[in-house]
């Protein structure tokens, strides 16, 4: 069972005479009234011996997991210590769960108590998601200050009981436990636990056996834990799930606290079989689908950090950059030139269709939009390859206006605002016919320049004019067989790596391993409009039936991109007058004073976008569909059949496909997902959403409906 969408409530706070937050719901404080920061440093940082461990760190990623994000004080204190330690090139990932998130304004007020953390707090506040967020939000925090190291924050807003079902493949059935199943190539583990939250006596719903089971499943032999409480339910829960506990002196007036270390060989003599009988759900159910999981019981023959990325458009460039930053030697193979296909337009909006639906597409759209805007801003891509101008989504009809109002009635945050007609005209710099949804953190980018920048990394080698005709594997390596043109004839060249990611849009279907993927090819024509007295005033991107970007400059002068058309079952590459008129008519309907110069020559570009039947991209491991469907054939007769097996994946082979017209918004989070699957770190999306991105999902759905 997963959380019901949009069921969360923000925390309701009282403030004491010292301006410290108190929860009236739980009649408890968020941190010590003596000194909250000193309490955090003593209980969680010293309790887990983080300073000593970080100054001798040898692993690529160090992961902290926390129950109870609250005001974010524990996170900021850990980040502050991380900045002071000699951690080399290692990454810090901080995973936190919170059922009652603070509103942005309450978070800001609470963190103002700690001026010594102001610089870090400002970065957190600038990237804090709209509230009350439901599910998992992936936040990367970067600073231009050299003394602040980047950190990755994974915030799960929901109950602790549901969190670990959504974050990791835990609560495994006996049938597949020996397979060491994981979403990716290895199961991620937590190095240090901050077991926080309101006291067990006041918040018993959090301190359940599901929580302790989740802690166990996500711990390894070097995992440690610290908590302020010595309550019996906590001691029993930790002991019964493999932890050796120790009481030490508590902070301030508190007499004692607990620290613990994980012992995977603990025989749990106090644990009875009946205790966890109800905790063994069938992974074949629709809520815990084990076709999402990989069988990792056998080590890969070759796990070197090398990768082939096929395709140098937005998807391939983002994936290549992410893997290169994580230490992979990456070879990019492109059949034409960088960003020469659908990613080749001179400007595009960072755009998704936003709304408050109870569907996975709505959740993914908002997650992808917020992550993309943060990514492009913090890494300077908006500044170098476009502009963080803001984007206005027009309320062009009553249904669209109602959709935006429903979204803003639930969420509050700096990322989303509804503007009136007058306010929208002021934000854009031109008079328009209606108001809309304003995204001040978004903007537009030149995809060609963006791809070139993403591929500028010492770990990336690019081979243009290399068309991959076949993929094969042997001894744990993938081989890409390429045709490369020479003066006389096409030569055959082969490249090899431990991993391969296919990111060639519709052309992926020409490869045997991708042939069954349900990809749709959609023709789109973008119109280039010469700037005029009206359009030159445009300051931000405007999106309605189509989109219009602010002016760019080329050798012919200033121009704008308008578009794009949407033509199924059309392979024509020719620029068409009728499609240009469609794009121009769309502008005329919302720009008050726009008059098109009929003498302007037909200028624009035709490209083919690739989409999927449900409009969500296909991101994840490629599987042997025939063998996988054979394993899961029982789903034909019972949709929640208990099948104790994993999918039959091609080890080390992945795809990033089907981004449609939303490549700029979708590909950053897709690249993060691919890299997390390969590197065995926690995913940027929750389990239920990942199930709706997995490439084999369509076949599983057909199987369950009896259509295969």
Image (tube, rainbow, N blue to C red):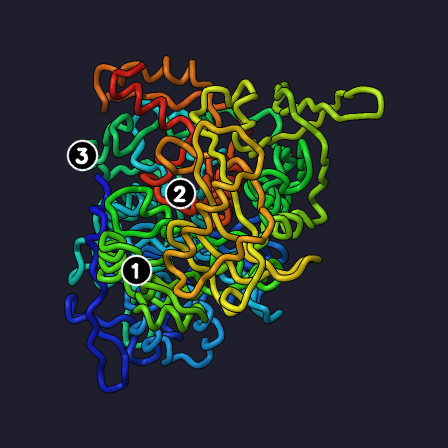
Q: Mark 1 highlights which residue?
A: 68
Does any portion of residue 680 appear in the rendered image? no
The answer to whether marks 3 and 2 mark residues whose Cβ atoms lie closer than 8 Å is: no
**Location of residue 164 in the rendering, given as x and y in whole percent from the top left corner:** 31, 44
Q: Is residue 329 above or below residue 588?
A: above
**Location of residue 611 in the rendering, given as x and y in whole percent from the top left corner:** 44, 34
Q: Earlier in the sequence, mark 1 or mark 2?
A: 1
Front disc: 1 or 2: 1
Pointer 3: residues within 10 angstroms few (<14), some, or many (20+)?
few
**Location of residue 390 in the rendering, given as x and y in whole percent from the top left corner:** 45, 64
Q: Earlier in the sequence, mark 3 or mark 2?
A: 2
**Location of residue 172 in the rendering, given as x and y in whole percent from the top left corner:** 31, 32
Badge 2 element: loop
Quadrant in which the C terminus is drawn: top left
Quadrant in which the N terminus is drawn: top left
Q: Residue at x 39, y 24 (%)?
A: 646
Q: Gap between marks 1 and 2, in whole Å?
A: 24 Å
Q: Is residue 431 above or below residue 468?
A: below
Compare residues 690 and 483 and report the one nearer the observer: 483
Front disc: 3 or 2: 3
Horizontal side of residue 33 vs 685, given as left or right: left
The answer to whether marks 3 and 1 mark residues whose Cβ atoms lie closer than 8 Å is: no
Q: Residue at x 53, y 48 (%)?
A: 527
Q: Residue at x 40, y 39 (%)?
A: 264
Q: Mark 3 highlights which residue?
A: 278
**Which numbered marker is on residue 263?**
2
């Amino acid at each position: 069972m997963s959380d019901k969408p949009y069921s969360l409530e923000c925390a309701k706070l009282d403030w004491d005479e010292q301006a410290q937050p108190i929860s009236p719901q739980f009649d408890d404080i968020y941190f010590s009234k003596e000194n909250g920061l000193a309490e955090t440093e003593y209980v969680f940082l010293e309790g887990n011996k983080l300073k000593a461990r970080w100054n001798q760190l040898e692993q690529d990623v160090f992961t902290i997991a926390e129950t109870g994000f609250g005001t974010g004080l524990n996170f900021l204190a850990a980040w502050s210590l991380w900045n002071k330690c000699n951690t080399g090139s290692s990454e810090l990932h901080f995973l936190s769960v919170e059922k009652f998130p603070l509103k942005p304004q309450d978070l800001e007020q609470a963190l103002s108590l700690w001026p010594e953390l102001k610089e870090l707090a400002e970065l957190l506040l600038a990237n804090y998601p709209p509230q009350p967020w439901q599910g998992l939000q992936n936040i990367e925090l970067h600073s231009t200050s050299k003394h602040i190291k980047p950190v990755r924050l994974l915030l799960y807003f929901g109950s602790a009981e549901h969190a670990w079902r959504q974050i990791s493949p835990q609560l495994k059935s006996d049938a597949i436990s020996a397979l060491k199943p994981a979403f990716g190539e290895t199961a991620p583990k937590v190095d240090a636990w901050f077991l926080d939250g309101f006291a067990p006596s006041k918040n018993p719903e959090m301190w359940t056996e599901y929580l302790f089971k989740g802690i166990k499943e996500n711990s390894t032999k070097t995992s440690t834990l610290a908590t302020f409480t010595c309550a019996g339910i906590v001691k029993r829960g930790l002991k019964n799930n493999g932890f050796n506990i120790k009481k030490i002196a508590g902070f301030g007036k508190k007499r004692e606290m607990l620290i613990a270390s994980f012992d995977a060989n603990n025989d749990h003599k106090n644990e009875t079989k009946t205790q966890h009988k109800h905790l063994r759900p069938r992974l074949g159910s629709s809520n815990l689908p084990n076709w999402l999981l990989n069988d990792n019981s056998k080590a890969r023959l070759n796990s070197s950090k090398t990768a082939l990325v096929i395709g140098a458009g937005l998807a391939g460039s983002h994936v290549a950059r992410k893997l290169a930053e994580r230490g992979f030697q990456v070879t990019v193979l492109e059949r034409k030139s960088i960003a020469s296909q659908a990613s080749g337009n001179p400007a595009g909006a960072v755009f998704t269709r936003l709304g408050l639906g109870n569907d996975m597409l709505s959740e993914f759209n908002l997650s992808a939009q917020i992550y993309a805007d943060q990514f492009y801003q913090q890494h300077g891509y908006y500044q170098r390859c476009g502009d963080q101008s803001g984007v206005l989504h027009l309320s062009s009809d009553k249904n669209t206006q109602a959709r935006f109002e429903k979204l803003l009635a639930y969420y509050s945050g700096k990322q989303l605002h509804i503007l009136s007609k007058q306010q929208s005209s002021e934000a854009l710099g031109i008079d328009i016919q209606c108001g809309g949804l304003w995204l001040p953190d978004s903007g537009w980018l030149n995809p060609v320049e963006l791809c070139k920048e993403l591929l500028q990394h010492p770990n990336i080698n690019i081979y243009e004019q290399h068309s991959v005709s076949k993929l094969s594997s042997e001894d744990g390596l993938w081989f890409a067989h390429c045709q490369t043109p020479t003066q006389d004839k096409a030569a055959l060249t082969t490249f090899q790596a431990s991993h391969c990611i296919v990111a060639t849009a519709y052309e992926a279907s020409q490869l045997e391993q991708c042939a069954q993927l349900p990809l749709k090819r959609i023709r789109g024509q973008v119109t280039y409009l010469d700037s005029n007295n009206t359009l030159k005033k445009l300051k931000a991107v405007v999106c309605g039936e189509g989109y219009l970007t602010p002016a760019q400059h080329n050798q012919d002068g200033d121009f704008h991109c308008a578009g794009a058309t949407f033509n199924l079952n059309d392979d024509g590459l020719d620029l068409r007058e009728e499609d240009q008129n469609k794009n121009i008519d769309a502008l005329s309907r919302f720009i008050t004073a726009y008059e098109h110069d009929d003498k302007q020559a037909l200028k624009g570009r035709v490209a083919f976008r690739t989409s999927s039947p449900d409009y969500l991209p296909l991101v994840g491991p490629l599987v042997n569909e025939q063998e996988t469907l054979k394993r899961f054939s029982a789903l034909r007769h019972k949709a929640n059949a208990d099948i104790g097996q994993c999918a039959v994946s091609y080890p080390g082979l992945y795809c990033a496909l089907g981004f449609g017209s939303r490549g700029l918004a979708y590909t950053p989070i897709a690249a993060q997902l691919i890299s997390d699957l390969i590197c065995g770190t926690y995913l940027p999306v929750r389990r239920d959403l990942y199930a709706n991105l997995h490439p084999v999902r369509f076949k599983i759905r057909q199987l369950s409906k009896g259509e295969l």
